[in-house]
């Protein structure tokens, strides 16, 4: 009987265990529904603040130059200038010496008579500038010189706006452009205010003289002036006659180009010749 009960209990336990093990859900897992498509639009990226481009600096307008001519007088509050005739030579003035970069070079210059209308003496060294251009191509920077340390008030001062030029440039040029400038009151040029650059265009007062080629050499002018004053020691007639013949010969060789300087010189020669002839006839 005990064996029978034990066997029965064992069978009950086996069945119970079998029932528990098979109680799980053996059906296939359900597929999950796919996620619904989203309709949310991604937010647009805000544009980054771009730094504004700096506008290009406008080019400074071309400096204006006041046109002047030979014999003209420039009058300002502090100065008066009388424009002379352009010329060239080995010296700016007889019996003077000015240093040159090359001993072969010549001086091309514009002589002026300068009157300082201010109450104090002024210096031209750091207050002026000159630029001379031949045939719109060859440019040379120069200076103003008055053969003195200062320009005294109300004194007529012989002054030269000049540049050092190779002789070859002076052989066949057809046009010369002389530009010169100076500060107000002939004060020293302000380098800092002008970005440490120095050009004629940066000066307060700017002037320009344009002339044709063939300026009379200063040596010829000096010789003519000396003979006008002193003569040749023989009544003057032979020397002047020879001078005129030589001058006419030079003019023919150069092509006979008319120029104001030559016209003035020839006129002076003719006038002096006539006076010398008259004087010579009186001596007879």
Image: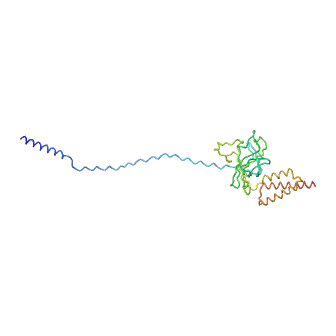
The answer to whether 42 appears left or right of 94 in the picture is left
Q: Spot the residue most to the left.
A: 1
Q: Position of residue 282 (x, y in %)?
A: 92, 54
Instruction: Identify the colour scheme used.
Output: rainbow
**Which residue is more in the foreground, 267 or 128?**
128
Q: Spot the residue most to the front.
A: 103
The answer to whether 218 appears left or right of 136 in the picture is right
**Which residue is more in the foreground, 73 or 175?**
175
**In what quadrant of the picture does the C terminus appear?**
bottom right
The answer to whether 185 appears left or right of 236 in the picture is left
Q: Position of residue 76 (x, y in %)?
A: 74, 44
Q: Tell how many labels.
A: 0
Q: Position of residue 30 (x, y in %)?
A: 26, 50
Q: Quadrant of residue 211?
A: bottom right
The answer to whether 234 appears left or right of 17 in the picture is right
Image height check: is 247 above or below 50? below
Q: Spot the residue most to the top.
A: 119
**In what quadrant of the picture does the N terminus appear?**
top left
Image height check: is 238 above or below 158? below
**Which residue is more in the foreground, 81 or 92?**
92
Q: Position of residue 143 (x, y in %)?
A: 72, 47
């Amino acid at each position: 009987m005990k064996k029978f009960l034990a066997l029965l209990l064992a069978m009950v336990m086996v069945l119970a265990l079998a029932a528990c093990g098979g109680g799980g859900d053996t059906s296939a897992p359900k597929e999950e529904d796919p996620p619904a498509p989203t309709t949310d639009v991604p937010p647009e990226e805000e544009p980054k603040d771009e730094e504004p481009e700096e506008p290009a600096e406008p080019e400074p307008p071309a400096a204006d130059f006041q046109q002047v001519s030979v014999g003209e007088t420039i009058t300002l509050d502090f100065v008066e200038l009388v424009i002379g005739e352009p010329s060239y030579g080995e010296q700016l003035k007889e019996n003077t010496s000015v240093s040159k970069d090359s001993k072969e070079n010549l001086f091309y210059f514009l002589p002026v008579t300068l009157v300082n209308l201010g109450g104090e003496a002024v210096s031209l060294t750091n207050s002026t500038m000159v630029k001379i251009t031949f045939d719109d191509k060859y440019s040379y920077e120069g200076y103003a010189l008055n053969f003195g340390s200062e320009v005294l008030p109300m004194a007529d001062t012989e002054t030269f706006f000049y540049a050092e030029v190779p002789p070859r440039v002076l052989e066949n040029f057809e046009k010369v452009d002389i530009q010169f400038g100076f500060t107000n009151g002939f004060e020293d040029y302000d380098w800092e205010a002008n970005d440490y650059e120095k050009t004629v265009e940066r000066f307060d007062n700017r002037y320009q003289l344009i002339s044709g080629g063939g300026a009379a050499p200063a040596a010829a002018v000096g010789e003519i002036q000396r003979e006008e004053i002193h003569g040749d020691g023989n009544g003057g007639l032979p020397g002047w006659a020879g001078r005129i013949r030589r001058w006419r010969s030079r003019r023919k060789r150069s092509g006979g180009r008319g120029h104001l300087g030559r016209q003035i010189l020839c006129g002076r020669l003719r006038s002096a010749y006539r006076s010398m002839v008259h004087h010579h006839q009186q001596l007879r």
